[in-house]
Structure formats: C-alpha cells, structure tokens
Image: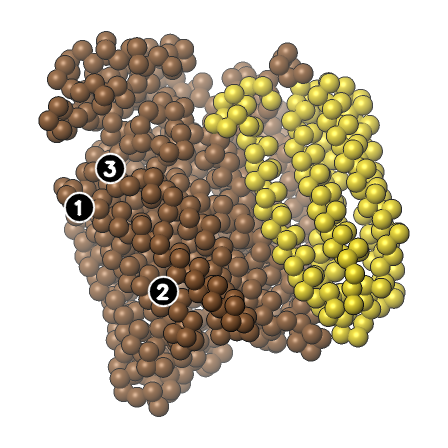
Chain colours: A brown, B yellow
Amino acid sequence: MATTTAPPQARSRSVFSRPTALDGFKGYLATTDHKKIGIMYFWSVMLFFFLGGVTAWIIRAQLASAESTLVTEEVYNQAFTLHGLTMVFLVVMPLGAAFFNYLIPLQIGARDVAFPRLNAFSFWTFLFGGLFLYSSVLFNAIPNGGWFGYAPLSTQIPGDNMAFYAVGLQIVGISSLSAAVNFITTILNMRAPGMTFMRMPVFTWMTLVTNFLLLFALPIIAVALFMLNGDVVFGTQFFQPATGGDPVLWQHLFWLFGHPEVYIMILPAMGIVSEVMPTFSRKPLFGYAAMVFAGVAIGFIGFGVWAHHMFTSAVGPVARSAFGLTTMFIAVPTGIKIFNWVFTMWGGKVKFTTAMLFSVGFVSMFTIGGLSGVTHAIVPHDAQQTDTYWIVAHFHYVLFGGALFGLVSGIYYYFPKVTGKLLGEKLGKWHFWTWLLGFNLTFGPMHMSGLLGQPRRTAVLPAELGTDVALYNVLSTAGVAVLTVSASIFLFNLVTSLRSGEASGDDPWDARTLEWMTPSPTPYVNFYEIPEVTARDEFWERKYAEAEDGSLRPVPAGASQDHDPSTSPASADEHGDEFPATAGGTATVDTSGNAKASPDDVALPEDEALAKATPDDHGGDTEHIHMPDPSYWPLIMCVGLLPLGYGLTFANPALLVVGALWLMMGLFGWILEPVAEGDDDDPEPSAAAA
Amino acid sequence: MSAAVEETSLGLDNRKLAMWVFLGSEFMFFGAFITAYLMYLNTTAGGPDGEIFDIVYTSVSSFVLLMSSLTMVLAHHAHEQGDMRRMRMWILATAFQGLVFVGGQAYEFTKFFKEGLVPTASPFASSFFVLTGFHGVHVTVGIIMLLGLWSYSRVGKVKASQPLKTEIIGLYWHFVDVIWVIIFVVVYLIPWG
C-alpha cells in the first residue's frame, strides 16, 4: 500500500466497492486500522482468558482433595488440554499481538502496518481459529491429549478430539504466520525518517525478534499438525509404531516449535517492561545495546534448546549433554536483561504506579521462574522432576509471573494512550497485590508438591502422597480463588475506567518514545506529521534538555516548534541549521541536548502545545493523508476457513471443496476491490519505471 | 516501483520484502517435511519402497519445471521492457509448464496408487506423498497466481509500469523450483535400502 496522492476517482458501487464506515459495529467488521484491530485482539483475549480461567477452576477443584471424583478423568483431560491451549494460543500470544498491533506503527512513526488488510485477516483468522477450537464442545470432541498433543498417544485417542486440536491450531497458526510477515515488513521497512535500528524502542526490537521466531517456528508446527491430522483423520502412518513410525518424531517437531514458542510469549512482555521501567524510573534504559543484543541472542539460542523437553525420551547421552549446555547458556542473555532492568531502576526516581508495580513483579517472578528453569538444564535433576508439579510451577512462573505480569503492566501503561483515560490506580494497586498474592499462593506450593512427587497431567491426586501434598494442593486451589477475585477487580476497574476514568491528557507518564507524541486517544491518522527521529528516546529529548550541571530542563513550549507545513518536505534535512533560530529563548540549555529538536516536531510537553498537533494546525485538512481503506474481504475470506477446517476434521470432501472455493473467491475479491483513491500501486508510467 | 521504493526504510518495496520473508518461512516448512522423509526412508512396513520411483519419468517433468524458471525470467524481463504482449506469452508458457509438472505428478501418483504405494501404506509412503503433495499444492497455487497475473495484465489492472508484480510472483515461482531441486535429489536420487 504505497502512499499516493492520486485524486479520488468516482466509482460505481458494486460488491467490489470499498466500505466507507469507520465507526460503529460495521466500522469494526471492515476495519483495517491497526488500532481497532489491536482493540479487537484485546477484547477477544479477555473472552478467552475467562474461558481459560474456567478450565483452570475445573483442574484446581478436582485436585483440591486427594482421590477426588468431582469430574471424570475424561473431563479432567479435556480441561487441562483446553486450559493449556487457551492460555498459550488464545491469551498470551494474541495479547502480545494486541500490543504489536496498537503500538508498532506508533512506535516507529508510521500510519499503519505494511499490509492493513492482511492484518485484519490475521485477527479474524485468530478469532475463528479460537472459536473453531471451542466449537469442539458442540461435537463432544474437546481436545484431550494435552496442549503438547504427544503422538502416538494423541493418534490413538478415539473420536475427533485431536482432529480439532490439529486443525484448530493450524488455523491459529495461519493467523500468526501472516501477522509475522506483516510485522517484520512493517518494522524493517516503515520506520520514520531517522529511526535507525539502534534508535528503535526496545518493544519494537522485541516484536521484531518475536515475529522472526514465529516466522521460523510456525511452519514446523504446521508440518507436525498436518502429519497428526493425517494420522488421526486420513490414516497416514507418521506416528504409528505398528508400521515403524517413530514416537519421538512428534516430540522433536513439536518442541522445535514449542521452545521458540516460549520466547514468543515472553519477549513481548520483556519489551513492554523495557518501556515501562525507564519511564517510571525517569532514566534511560540501562544498557540499551546489551538489551537488544540479549533479545536477539535469546531468539537465536531459542532454536537450539528444544530437546531439554525430551531428556527422558530416547535422545541419547550426547543430545542430552549438548542441550543441557545450550539451555544453561540461554540463561546468560536472560540474566543480562534482568540485571539491566535492575540497573535501570537503580538510582532512578522510581514512581510505583500500577504499571511499574506489575513490571517489578515481572522481573522478580520471572527471576524465580528462570532459576527453577536452570534446574531443568541439569539432566539428572530434570529426570527426577519430569512430569511432576515442579515443572508446572516453573512454567507458570515464567508464563504467568513473567509474560502475563508484563502484558498486564502494558495494559495499565497504555490504557491512557488507547482511551484518553487513566485506568484506576487505586483499584489497580488492589489488583496488583491480590494478583501477586494469588499467583504465589497458587503456584508457589507446586514447587513443594512437585518435589514430593505429585505427578502432573493426572486426574486424581493420589492419597498415598501424604497430607503435606494434599495441603499444598488446597493452598493452590485457594490461590485460584484469590486470583479470581483479583481478575474481577481488574475487569471492574477496566469497565469503570472506560466509562468514567479520569482524563489522562496526552502524556500522563512523562514518557519517552514516539507513541506518546500523538494525542490520546490516538487519532485515526496516528501522526498528523510524520516525525523525524534524531534520538533513541525521541519524545523525551524533545521535552527535556540537559543543563550544564547535568539536571534536566524542560524545553520551553514553542521553542522547537511551528514550522510551516508547506515547507516540511524540503526542510527535512535542515534541522541542524534551523536550530539556533528556534531555540532563541533557551540560552542556558546545553546545545547537544537541544539539537535534537527538529522542525518536524508536532508535539510538546505542555498541554497547550499538544493542542497544536490537531488537524486545525494544518488547516483542518487531513484529507491529504492517505490511509488504508476499510474492507470486508479479510472477514469474508476467513469465513472459508471454517468449512475447510471442518472438512479436515471430519474428512468431508464436500466441505473441503466449499472451503477452498470460498477462500479462492475471497482472495480474488480481495485483489479486485478498488482503492478509494484510485490505483493502489505505482503511479502512471514514469521514465524511472522502465 | 519508483515512488514506493524511495519511501521505505530499506529501499525495498514492502510487497517484495514480505515475499522474501514469507519464503524464509517456507524453507522451514519444507525442511521439516524433508527431515521426516529422510527419517522414514527405510520404514516401508513391507510395502513398496523407493524402487518404485521412475527416475527417468520424473527427471523429464523436473526438467520442464526447471525450464519454467527460465520462461519466468523472460516474462519478468519482457515486463521490465514494457513489452506486455511478450510478457503475457512467457507467463502463459510458465503456467503451462507448471501444469505439465502437476499433471505429471498426478499421473505418477495414480501409477503408485495402483502399485500399492498409498499414503496409508507406511511411514515412508505417508512422508513421500505429503512432501511431494505439498510441493504440488505450491506449484498449483503458483499457476493460479500466474493465470491471475495474465488475466489482470489483459484487462489493464497490471500495467506495463509495474514489473514488480511479475517479479514478486517470479520470486515465489523460483522458490518452488529451487525446493523441487532439493526434493528431487532427496527423494529420487539418493539411494535407499
């Protein structure tokens, strides 16, 4: 979608004409706006998070007492499978995607992602994939072989349960893969002028790494799922030991995806924490370059540790030693990150807002999870712990205490950006402390019960494990009750703040990065003027300069401002020359700081200055800004995934044909639909094109 | 090509970059299938093994597919010259060769079916059909893209000034060819037993 200034063309309305609604329900169905898509991701995640919580309750209610018969083993298997699938694929991953969507174009100074319709397609595919997975309830075929779906166990389960697993994850995978292509292209190619790689916000960096992980890990699980789908539905022999199928093949394929997946879930949270910590410590991020390096290193090493999930499978001593070493090695970049966050806070004027509390919670809880993780790298130790609750405790400390704490921190931090209102701080602190308490109460005792031998993935808690283990399980269940209260506080806070939250202003946190330069809530066009980036903490550098004694001085309102928009394209490279004239009133300010001010500035720290960044400042005319047109085709096309999915689940050729044809139809509608402003492509033939 | 390229950070059109990124993912996709195939090379469960392959027959259809890369390059070259008539001719030639390949594969599969090599026969058979079958699906998608390009250029939606569109489809097509070179070597040329 290249920018073009071609005049609008009058077109007759047809099925291929573009929808025009930007607001209301229709506006959401047809939207290609990254902000609305991000919001839709968020609310879908809230729905699935509720369902994930329900399944967690089934598990914990069953395990609250030894030898319980509250639910059958089949229901228990379905509950823990669905819990894992929901929390991994329908909560943590898409919640990360919600942040990618909303923030990435804002953080890199773009008006949208590279492919807005593909972005809408990613969202609808995710939603339909999640609904498809949950539609297994209607067919009494809820997946019951664990989120890891180990074949050949999963291929021997009668019924369509694991077919729903294979196809449902496949659909969700298509969503993530198309989003990965989109975001990699966006980040690599659509940065504002001056935003070099080493000036990108750390969240943008972590998003880039995450999406590369998705790009290379998802095809592997796609292959594994196709094989499983074939074995379960169509009678292929990939995992059938009877004909020589290798039972370890699935484990290799699954964990070659599954371990990068762990970093896919944690890196976005790490990125958010890296934004929140500097803001509320009023210091630049400590060791930016090391932070970026560590993130990239985690991405690379993350592909070389998968067999530590298989130390008790038949992989041999050489593989065990090698993967034990790489697993210990990956703790190094993770440790770099932890220390850098601590040093960011060190000596800063730390302000404990709810967002900051969740970030501090992230660092501390993730450290606990990381330390128990290192124990898995020690092969004999791991052999003792495999399939015990020690493992369950570990991965909840990194995924709940880690990923989810970081993402919730992001919700508190960016809520004002999205809504223009503050998310209640008082309730927020209640939310945080109950969340922290409930989390530790639920998963802390699992360390103990695991070491005492409680097996995971087992429907009945054996009474022979003794009263200590039974007590730990009661504590865990009580912890879920606390978490439920906490989540209710959060939801209540969310709803009341949306309705009647305190107005936040545009920059409530005195933040540092580009996304806060836009008014809050973010206007449709994001930036009225694309900013020119000259520093890592661009917005901060525009607000503050360093005085000679090292203290901060605000750049006075208007000191670096108000260029004539008509000259902006030409003046883009001349900011250095213009500076002395614009900074006339700030003689005491160190020039090295103030030289960051560029004539393209549109926002200032003072509210009245931000008011200037409204369309009126530019003659009330945003018409000339080319924004992606809404489109129904991504949604229409995604509908075809449902017949295709059910066709693959039930081996129904008619449904397969319908689904494939529907997708083709959607694809051609997608291509044929016009762009409101004329051709979406290159301008008419020019000499350079030949 | 001209206007958009100058605006991007890397100087590469978004669509072209996205295709490269996507193809990176595709390599992992086929890599995993090829790994499974190699693992199950001798796991035939008493059914047909690699002896069944007709190397000469598949060499011919592979040659046709490889030559289609040449016509794809010629199509892109003609488009860059603004010669849409020749571009359409080479696009049709490419699509036709792709069809010959897919047709050849369909015939080959039917022959194997009759001789008892079916996807449900053994892990070896399953991985053979899934690997080559998914490649066939990729060629088919490529043919649909080529025919789309051909018809859009006829109605003027793809203009002489937009060789980028041919180039991007070409990237995909060459990828499908390169993957087939690997698959052909792995499946048909390396010894079994």
Q: Amino acid at mark 3?
A: Pro
- Residue drawn at 14 percent across, 43 percent down: A347
Q: Give the mark nearer the N terminus: 2 vs 1.
A: 1
Disc 1/disc 3 C-alpha distance (Å): 11 Å
Q: Which mark is residue A346?
A: 1
Q: Are marks 2 and 3 on the same chain?
A: yes
* Chain under numbered label 2: A
Residue B89 visible? The answer is yes
Q: Give the mark nearer the N terminus: 1 vs 3.
A: 3
- Residue drawn at 17 percent across, 26 percent down: A546
Q: Position of residue B176 (x, y in %)?
A: 71, 43
Disc 2/disc 3 C-alpha distance (Å): 30 Å
Q: Amino acid at mark 1?
A: Trp
Q: Which mark is residue A373?
A: 2
A667 over A612 or under it: above or below: below
Residue carrying label 3: A284
Asked whether B36 or B160 is in front, the reply is: B36
